Image (cartoon, rainbow, N blue to C red):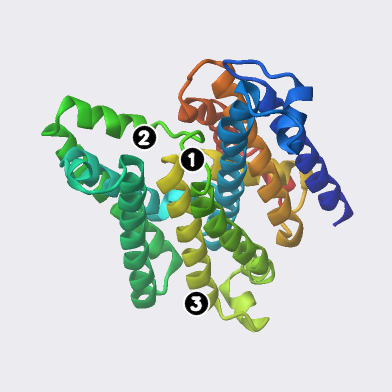
Amino acid sequence: MRNGILWSMVFAIAGVLLAALGLCIGSVHVPFSEVWGALSGSLPDGTSAIIVRQVRLPQVITAALAGSGLAAAGLIMQTIFRNPLAGPGVLGITSGAGLGVAVATLTGAATFLPLPKDVTLVAAALAGAAGVLLLIVLADRRIGDGLTLLIVGLMTGYLCSAVVSVLQSSSTAQALKDQVMWGMGTFGALRGDRILGLGVPVLLGTGAAVALVKPLNALLLGDAYATSMGTDVARTRRIAIATTGLLAGVVTAFCGPVSFLGLAVPHVARLFVRTSDHTVLMPASITLGATLAIGCDLIVRVAAGLPLNAVTSLLGAPVVLWVLLGGNNRFRS
């Protein structure tokens, strides 16, 4: 327990340091003294203050929220399905959000609605994610089996991807470009009050994830053991699915389908804390997820526009390969 708390603090401190670095570094370098002045209000409104307050600070906050939410969702899915390769998108919710965006962009609906384009895309993504989440919840009530539900989620994701491909085949070049750009992922799309649209659901979702740590610990030893310990397995699974759907759907809607963070972060956190106890692992995953997301965003800015998903994949894919090769077995307890 003490080791886990220590590592969570280390991850949090590293996140703060990366965030401070992220406020300084970009296409325009801002000295830390000016960053501090912009945050404290002592720096007069000028170019540096505008860059820090209106561009970089929202981007850092968005990255931290997205990373923490995806990490919590990934850990929940890996526990619920007892599958180390499960992630936030395993139930098809991310694909549902992608389908919503595809319908809005590739059919031209986004150009006819009396809303800003970015608001339309977020609304479409949320609608698609909510639709798939509703389908999964209804399927869980009917099936009641984790493995079958996992297959239903995967098939739903494939179906959504197939519909997107059909829409892409008959879309205009500009609409296809918008769809591809959204699919690359970004932490830099939110400004001002719109961060609340991401922040409130993510905070609620991560709070629910922390509240689930005891039932999740019981599920580690199987449904029969969890039931004998007084855990309502079906109810826990539905709450976990709803929590994951909220986190994955909202993050995907605002940031695009950010890959590998939710899948890889829980394994990296487990490597450090050396336990599968969720009272330790969940806070460590949340803080590490936020820190790594801030770091990925910093790399994107330093690399002058490198796609976010390229960075997360380069960092996350080796972790997945390591898991497949059995490198994580010694840290399970």
Q: Tell me the CA gap for discs 1 and 2.
A: 16 Å
Residues marked 1 and 2 touching at CB (< 8 Å)? no
Residue at image position (45%, 59%) is 245
The answer to which of marks 1 and 3 sits earlier in the sequence is 1
Direction front: furthest residue? 44
Secondary structure beneath dot 3 equals helix
Residue ID for mark 3? 234
Of 92 and 177, nearer the camera is 177
Secondary structure beneath dot 2 equals helix
Decide if residue 221 is in sight here. Answer: no
The answer to which of marks 1 and 2 sits earlier in the sequence is 2
Question: Tag 2: residue type?
Answer: Gly
Q: Tell me the CA gap for discs 1 and 3.
A: 37 Å
Residue at image position (60%, 19%) is 26
Residue ID for mark 1? 190
**Mark 3 neighbour class, 10 Å CA radius: few under 14, some 14 to 19, many 20 or more:** some
| Drawn side of residue 80 relative to residue 112, left or right | right
Residue ID for mark 2? 183
| Between marks 3 and 2 in the image, the one whose residue lies nearer the viewer | 2
